[in-house]
């Protein structure tokens, strides 16, 4: 067992974990952060995507011990002060989800994508989401949602309102 | 209650047809979800399965000693240990009275029949410990010859020494199902049509492969069983909580009333969660044995190898036509791979397709015959469309072939054969009555959106200039039968259950409304769409309606969700239940208003006394009924109502799908440029939800055409056993679509709606393959086998001689021996037809 201390969705947490424990298992089983889900065992689906120190990672691909001292944000910590993140809003507005299983990962990845590139083209969005599988939506409305969020200025401040590539 | 709390009548009527944002989403986008795997109960144990690595083997010994001694392991069980309580996995549809149906024990004790079958289960205090201990279970096998190839398996008999999936049955043939229009009296004799075409007409003989696919819902299957209450509670990631409860009760002897099944949030199904699974039965048995709650959640690898697959057919087709391209007869001869067992609907899947090969066309003669075959691979069953994509693929590919033969535009040849809009209702050669449709309108709109004539002109230019990148235009004018299903028809087909659906509407004292449906959503948006229907019907605010489903204790009666049935069957049940509420409220309204029942009219949520400004809201009546102080004599103090609706007919959405595909003739690389579809799904409750269903359906159908295939190696191991090898499309592989609708309301339900869940998948596969072939037709290519990988396309272009790529193209796109794409032995290319120039 190894002691780790980190911040998850704004809360300081500390636990003893087995060295082999994956971050996603730590989040789900130890912390009860079941908003983050597991869709595969080969790091292909992206359902488990969270932010580690502000950047998206597949939490099935990171050991809990690697997150020691880090700041983790999951889908459950994305809304601030009861206000949805603009990307969350956009997914609802554009019907970017059906069963919703891929959605936490898809939203976390989209937030990261827009932080990196506030005004992505459709192609950039599609490439940016390549590591996240969705079986329900055919991606059409997910792409629209990201475009919509971009138009709302969901990326970093400089992008606000520019809305390039938001053909929705 | 005052008038300000109600909406004006004209606004009330607007709920149906609105792009309501989904009620479901708030939880899903914030991670407040109830997936089965999220559930933790006090003292809960975790299960891990020990699975067979062999496709077919006798189990000669299982040593569980080491596993039992592992830390925190609570129990290890084999099939023999649990034999008396495991129940069985049922087949609900013996398609013929003499169907050969092997017994399906959830955990066989003596013989495994596919790689991935469960032979032992470990229960431990944590999932990791259970998995570790499962590694310690030592199973000895005596390997048996495995029946793997569908065609070979169909021919195998005990005397030939060929492999049998179940040697004790003496055959791999399960059932032979025939429909013949001459025998049924619905049309002529197909053999006559074929003879006629042979001497004086066009005769097309083709063989198409429907590759094996994996539904690959994103949420892995998971089950939790809690035996500690008065009822045994089962949470399962299933599409069919009601059917599952029945199946558990029927096969374990536990009274149905002692079982509660809950499908909480379910992450997609697509038919793949329409199953009573061995995993559910094993978890049920272990929980009862240990008296503790247990949870089992599969890994993705387990899911791909053991959750049922779909499709997997060989289709031999003979189409007879006149020289000017009028079809005179169609004969379909199918081989369908069941896998190792006949799954719950298993053998019925091709039968669901049997009525659809004639599609939107007026064929005078039709024969369908299908042999279902057992093999040592995982069982097959429903996958989005279930039988109808296979049928649509075959006929839409054939119509393109016919057009090429006649030398005309494929849309013109289709139109020559299709049912004209003024001919509805139309009795088809397969014995169905199509109630409504307008193929002309959908096609005209699709051509316009697509820029059909311009793209054809561009295609011509590229052909003439010998452009390296050729343009193909693919067409699919599909229809399907959905809204499963009239119980009487199911009875005639020997299906084990009915096809009705149940709904109830509860009027709460505070004016809120609870709606309970027997349909079981897993991503479709029932809560939103059903709220819209009830809001309109009762004239109450959308937000005041709560839709409950997926729990047999709340929704005591239902037949769940599949076959695009929820709206057209479940929605109609709901309409009827809501109408009963209004009927019940009426005499009470008259009493409270001191008016005659005959003077009342209902609209906008209120009963009005005709010709006065007097009225009362239905929600006020609900409050009055709750108090029950002042009701007419003899009136029951409730407005709550329920309805069970059995559809009178299937439901027939249709549409025209057009795909433009660029094909690099040097590399075989494909690039989809445009996809347009115009679907006629009748009246639309929520256009936003409909668009989502269409997009998602399209991509699943396109994926069959271009990417997906479940491949087994020579020893029966699933090679495409992870998401590395089973190629689900990503956002980067797909494009945005242009979709629109025409509207011919269904005449068989009061909402005028048709199903939409499967339409995109059914339609898109042939549109895409037709586009690929259309691009290459001048090069002599008339078929590319699915999935149309660049390699297969390249080979089709580069092989010469013998007609028909079908046969040669059968080389796996994925080399099972190396797991590498594109390493198939090139010498096989010699037979790799693809040209008939
Ligand atoms: S669970 Fe699939 S990538 Fe992490
Ligand atoms: S919404 Fe179901 S997998 Fe994406």
Image (cartoon, grey):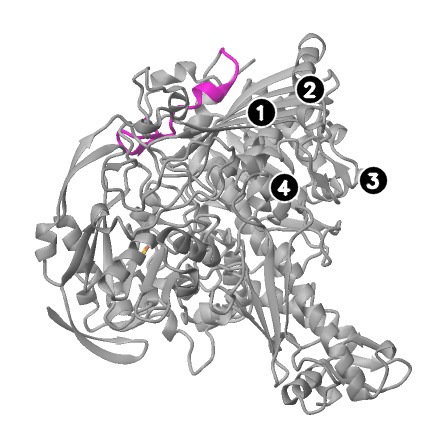
Residue B415 picture location, percent across and down: 75, 31
- Horizontally, residue B466 falls left or right of residue B831, namely right
| Mark identifier at residue B332 | 1
| Mark identifier at residue B480 | 4
- Horizontally, residue B18 falls left or right of residue B733, namely right
Magenta highlight range = B801-823
* Residue found farthest to the right: B611
Q: Sequence-wise, which precedes: disc 3 or disc 2?
A: 2
Badge 3 and badge 4 in a common chain:
yes
Residue at x 56% of width, y 13% of height: B837
Up the image or down, B610 lies above or below B338; here it is below
Few, some or many residues within 10 Å of mark 3 (<14, 14–19, 20+):
few
Up the image or down, A15 lies above or below B465; here it is below
The reply to whether the C-beta atoms of the residues labelled 2 and 4 are less than 8 Å apart is no
Local secondary structure at mark 4: loop
Question: Which label lies toward us, 1 or 2?
Answer: 2
The image quadrant where one finds ligand 1 is bottom left
In the rendered image, the quadrant that contains the N terminus of chain B is bottom right
- Horizontally, residue A98 falls left or right of residue A168, namely left
Q: Sequence-wise, which precedes: disc 3 or disc 4?
A: 3
Q: Nearer the viewer, residue A36 or B578?
A: B578
Q: CA distance from mark 3 to mark 4?
A: 19 Å
Judging by the rendered image, the residue that carries numbered circle 2 is B189
Q: Nearer the viewer, residue A150 or B254?
A: B254
The chain ID associated with circle 1 is B
Badge 3 and badge 2 in a common chain:
yes
The chain ID associated with circle 4 is B
Q: Sequence-wise, which precedes: disc 1 or disc 2?
A: 2
Residue at x 40% of width, y 14% of height: B830
Residue at x 37% of width, y 55% of height: B253
The reply to whether the C-beta atoms of the residues labelled 3 and 1 are less than 8 Å apart is no
């Amino acid at each position: 067992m190894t002691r780790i201390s980190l911040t998850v969705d704004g809360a300081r947490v500390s636990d003893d974990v087995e060295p082999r424990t994956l971050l996603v298992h730590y989040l789900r089983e130890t912390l009860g952060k079941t908003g983050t889900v597991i869709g595969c065992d080969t790091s292909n689906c992206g359902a488990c995507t969270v932010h580690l120190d502000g950047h998206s990672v597949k939490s099935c691909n990171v050991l809990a011990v690697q997150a020691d001292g880090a700041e983790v944000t999951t889908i459950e910590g994305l809304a601030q002060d009861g206000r949805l993140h603009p990307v969350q809003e956009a997914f609802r507005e554009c019907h970017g989800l059906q069963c919703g299983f891929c959605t936490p990962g898809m939203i976390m990845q989209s937030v990261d994508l827009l932080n990196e590139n506030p005004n992505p083209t459709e192609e950039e969005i599609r490439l940016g989401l390549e590591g996240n599988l969705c079986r329900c939506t055919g991606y059409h409305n997910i792409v629209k949602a990201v475009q919509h969020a971009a138009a709302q200025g969901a990326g970093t401040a400089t992008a606000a309102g520019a809305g390039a590539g938001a053909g929705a | 209650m005052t008038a300000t709390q109600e909406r004006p009548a004209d606004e009330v009527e607007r709920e149906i047809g609105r792009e309501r944002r989904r009620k479901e989403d708030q939880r899903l986008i914030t991670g407040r979800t109830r997936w089965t795997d999220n559930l933790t109960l006090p003292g809960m144990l975790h299960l891990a399965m020990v699975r067979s690595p062999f496709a077919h083997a006798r189990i000669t010994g299982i040593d569980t000693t080491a596993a039992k001694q592992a830390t925190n392991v609570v129990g290890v069980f084999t099939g023999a240990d649990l034999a008396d309580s495991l129940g069985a996995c049922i087949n609900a549809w013996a398609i013929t009275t003499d169907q050969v149906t092997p017994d399906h024990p959830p955990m066989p004790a003596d013989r495994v029949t596919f790689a991935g079958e469960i032979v032992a289960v470990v229960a431990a205090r944590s999932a990791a410990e259970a998995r570790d201990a499962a590694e310690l279970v030592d199973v000895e096998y005596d390997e048996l010859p495995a029946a793997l190839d569908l065609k070979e398996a169909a021919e195998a008999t005990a005397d030939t020494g060929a492999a049998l999936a179940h040697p004790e049955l003496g055959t791999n043939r399960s059932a032979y199902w025939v429909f013949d229009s001459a025998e049924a009296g619905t049309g002529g004799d197909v053999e006559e049509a074929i003879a006629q075409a042979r001497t004086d007409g066009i005769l097309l003989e083709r063989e198409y492969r429907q590759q094996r696919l994996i539904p690959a819902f994103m949420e892995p299957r998971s089950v939790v069983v809690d035996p500690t209450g008065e009822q045994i509670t089962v949470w399962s990631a299933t599409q069919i909580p009601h059917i599952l409860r029945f199946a558990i009760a029927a096969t374990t002897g536990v009274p149905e009333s002692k079982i509660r099944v809950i499908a909480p949030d379910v992450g997609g199904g697509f038919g793949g969660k329409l199953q009573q699974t061995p995993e559910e039965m094993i978890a049920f048995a272990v929980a009862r044995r240990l008296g503790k709650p247990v949870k089992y959640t599969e890994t993705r690898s387990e899911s791909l190898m053991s959750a049922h697959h779909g499709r997997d057919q060989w289709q031999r087709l003979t189409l007879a036509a006149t020289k000017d391209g009028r079809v005179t007869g169609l004969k379909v001869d199918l081989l369908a791979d069941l896998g190792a067992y006949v799954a719950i609907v298993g053998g019925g899947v091709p039968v669901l397709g049997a009525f659809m090969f004639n599609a939107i066309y007026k064929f005078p003669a039709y024969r369908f015959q299908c042999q279902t075959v057992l093999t040592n691979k995982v069982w097959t069953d429903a996958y989005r469309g279930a039988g109808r994509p296979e049928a649509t693929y075959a006929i839409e590919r054939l119509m393109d072939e016919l057009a090429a033969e006649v030398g005309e535009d494929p849309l013109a040849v289709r139109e020559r054969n299709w049912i004209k809009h003024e001919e509805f209702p139309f009795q088809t050669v397969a014995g169905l009555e199509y109630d409504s449709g307008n193929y002309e309108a959908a096609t005209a709109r699709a051509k316009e959106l697509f820029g059909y004539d311009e793209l054809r002109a561009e295609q011509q230019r590229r052909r003439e200039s010998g452009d390296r990148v050729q343009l193909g235009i693919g067409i699919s004018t599909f229809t399907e039968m959905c809204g499963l299903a009239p119980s009487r028809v199911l009875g005639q087909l020997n299906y084990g259950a009915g096809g009705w659906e149940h709904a109830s509407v509860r009027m709460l004292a505070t004016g809120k409304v609870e709606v309970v449906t027997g349909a079981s959503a897993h991503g479709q948006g029932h809560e939103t769409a059903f709220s819209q229907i009830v809001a309109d019907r009762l004239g109450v605010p959308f937000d005041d309606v709560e839709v409950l489903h997926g729990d047999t204790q709340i929704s005591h009666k239902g037949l769940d969700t599949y076959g695009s049935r929820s709206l057209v069957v479940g929605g109609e049940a709901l309409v009827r239940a809501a109408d009963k509420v209004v009927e019940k409220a009426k005499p009470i309204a008259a009493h409270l208003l001191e008016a005659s029942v005959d003077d009342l009219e209902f609209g906008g949520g209120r009963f009005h006394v005709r010709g006065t400004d007097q009225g009362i809201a239905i929600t006020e009546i609900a409050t009055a009924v709750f108090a029950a102080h002042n009701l007419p004599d003899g009136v029951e103090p409730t407005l709550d109502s329920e309805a069970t609706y059995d559809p009178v007919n299937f439901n027939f959405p249709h549409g025209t799908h057009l795909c433009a595909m660029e094909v690099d003739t040097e590399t075989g690389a494909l690039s989809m440029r445009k996809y347009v579809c115009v679907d006629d799904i009748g009246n639309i409750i929520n256009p936003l939800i409909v668009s989502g269903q269409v997009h998602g359906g399209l991509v699943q159908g396109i994926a069959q055409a271009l990417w997906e295939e479940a491949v087994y190696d020579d020893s029966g191991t699933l090679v495409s056993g992870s998401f590395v090898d089973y190629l689900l499309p990503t956002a980067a592989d797909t494009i945005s679509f242009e979709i629109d609708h025409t509207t011919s309301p269904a005449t068989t339900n009061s909402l005028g709606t048709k199903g939409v869940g499967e339409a995109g998948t059914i339609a898109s596969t042939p549109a895409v393959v037709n586009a690929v072939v259309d691009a290459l037709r001048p090069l002599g290519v008339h078929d590319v086998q699915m999935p149309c990988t660049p390699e297969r396309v390249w080979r089709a272009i580069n092989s010469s001689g013998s007609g028909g790529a079908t046969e040669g193209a059968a080389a796996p796109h994925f080399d099972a021996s190396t797991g590498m794409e594109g390493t198939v032995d090139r010498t096989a290319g010699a037979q790799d037809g693809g040209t008939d120039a």
